[in-house]
């Protein structure tokens, strides 16, 4: 029996506007490929981002994820030690011991970095070790039942070893990612991101700490912060260092340590602008670091602040910093780093003085606003000024020398601050710190070289 042939399905016609969806006669391509081809002809199609734009994007995302742990460590490690029963002197050592390690470790760290043609691998390794240190602080109460304060002090100091390397390397990397003209904006955006993350994290963290029993609350906070901050290493790994920078980072032959140090000292002493800048900053940093260990003591012990209040004050400071950065960036472009740095010194002199004059917690909200506004201008102008006076070919070494000199004061000044607090009171020590900052602002005015006399940076 003859099989009746079925009706042949009519061939679907293709509209001319959709003809791009086909490859040849009757052959189709995936829809996403076709749409990509159509989008390539659209007049508003976005151009492919440059390597510099991709690098900055990865750098900013890294900043966000790292900012979670950075804000937790900066705000709550000292409060954790106080909750564990730390004395004024022990809080002073908690703030000072990392600075002492930096004094002796930063310059060798810089020489190690300068010998690397590719610096991202060492940044990733030290970044991982740095984050691991805060996880150890979180786990410490599970294994140590006595001398917990001493354990926190020691672990916080050991974290300084990888932190010193990554800080010098990141500072040099920031200078390599973009030109000197765009650097102020990059620094502003990075600091705004750090402050924004800090504002959110410390506010939520302070409320969380009041809801969960001690010490589990701090363990969970530090552990969660460590885990989140690990995401930043993925974005650091995606940064592509330009070939011109790799050529400038050519490997240097090994020399005796004494010869390298002797040559480095001779070179640095010959950099008159760098020496004047470093001298002025060191004097100011005596006042900057003198009250470092006193803030938490004054809020928690003298004014009876709980963790929620600690988080709120840190949040207000961060919010004021965020709102100030872009405005100060424009002022810096118009007026120069020198003038903004001097104004910042005068403004920061008010912060510890007004805190010492506050008998209650509520006025500290206004004090935090003042601290945030002038911290933004100081961080921006001092960082840019430092890069201006550092020769690009030896920038890691100059950054390390500058940071080592600053860390001498960062080690001694907090101990002096707690000594003055034990001798009189925390309030008197805060007022003295404000006076020392005012003197330091005078040195900034007298010693800082004019921006007009600085040589243009070679790119």
Image (spheres, rainbow, N blue to C red):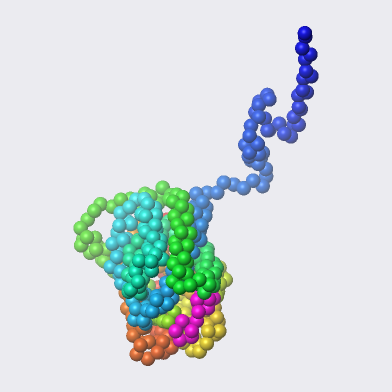
96 or 229: nearer the eye? 229
Residue 309, how many percent across, how many down?
53, 78
243 or 188: nearer the eye? 188
In which quadrant of the rendered image does the C terminus lie?
bottom left
Residue 269, how many percent across, how many down?
29, 69
* One can see residue 124 in this view: yes
| 437 relative position to 28: left or right | left
- Dominant secondary structure, magenta: helix
Residue 102, how many percent across, how many down?
32, 68
Seen in the picture, residue 167 relative to 339 is either above or below; the reply is above
Range drawn in magenta: 299-315
Residue furthest out toward the top: 1
Q: Quadrant of residue 35?
A: top right
* One can see residue 179 in this view: no
| 330 relative position to 292: left or right | right
User: Does the magenta run of residues contain 302?
Assistant: yes
């Amino acid at each position: 029996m003859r099989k009746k042939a079925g009706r042949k399905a009519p061939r679907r016609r293709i509209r001319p506007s959709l003809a791009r969806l086909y490859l040849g006669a009757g052959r189709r391509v995936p829809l996403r490929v076709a749409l990509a081809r159509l989008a390539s002809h659209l007049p508003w199609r976005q151009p492919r981002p440059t390597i510099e734009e991709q690098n900055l994007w990865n750098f900013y995302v890294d900043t966000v994820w790292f900012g979670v742990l950075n804000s937790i460590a900066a705000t709550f490690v000292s409060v954790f030690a106080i909750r564990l029963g730390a004395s004024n002197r022990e809080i002073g050592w908690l703030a000072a011991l990392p600075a002492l390690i930096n004094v002796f470790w930063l310059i060798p760290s810089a020489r190690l970095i300068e010998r690397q043609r590719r610096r991202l691998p060492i940044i990733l390794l030290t970044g991982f070790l740095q984050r691991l240190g805060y996880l150890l602080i979180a786990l410490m109460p599970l294994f140590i039942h006595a001398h917990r304060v001493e354990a926190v002090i020691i672990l916080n100091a050991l974290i300084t070893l990888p932190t010193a390397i990554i800080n010098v390397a990141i500072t040099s990397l920031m200078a390599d990612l973009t030109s000197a003209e765009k650097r102020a904006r990059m620094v502003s955006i990075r600091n705004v991101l750090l402050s924004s993350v800090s504002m959110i994290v410390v506010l939520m963290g302070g409320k969380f700490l009041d809801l969960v029993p001690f010490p589990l609350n701090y363990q969970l906070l530090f552990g969660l912060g460590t885990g989140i901050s690990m995401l930043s290493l993925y974005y650091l790994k995606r940064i592509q260092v330009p070939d011109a920078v790799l050529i400038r980072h050519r490997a240097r032959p090994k020399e005796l340590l004494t010869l390298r140090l002797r040559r480095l000292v001779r070179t640095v002493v010959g950099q008159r602008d760098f020496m004047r800048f470093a001298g002025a900053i060191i004097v100011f940093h005596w006042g900057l670091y003198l009250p470092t260990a006193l803030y938490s003591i004054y809020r928690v012990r003298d004014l009876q602040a709980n963790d929620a209040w600690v988080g709120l004050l840190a949040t207000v400071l961060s919010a004021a910093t965020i709102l100030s950065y872009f405005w100060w960036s424009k002022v810096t472009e118009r007026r120069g780093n020198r003038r903004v740095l001097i104004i910042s010194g005068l403004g920061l002199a008010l912060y510890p003085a007004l805190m010492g004059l506050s008998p209650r917690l509520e006025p500290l909200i206004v004090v935090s606003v003042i601290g945030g506004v002038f911290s933004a201008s100081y961080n921006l102008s001092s960082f840019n000024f430092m890069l201006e006076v550092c020769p690009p070919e030896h920038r890691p070494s100059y950054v390390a020398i500058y940071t080592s000199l600053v860390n001498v004061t960062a080690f001694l000044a907090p101990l002096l601050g707690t000594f003055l607090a034990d001798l009189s009171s925390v309030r008197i020590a805060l007022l003295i710190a404000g006076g020392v900052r005012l003197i330091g602002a005078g040195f900034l005015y007298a010693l800082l070289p004019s921006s007009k006399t600085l040589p243009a940076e070679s790119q």
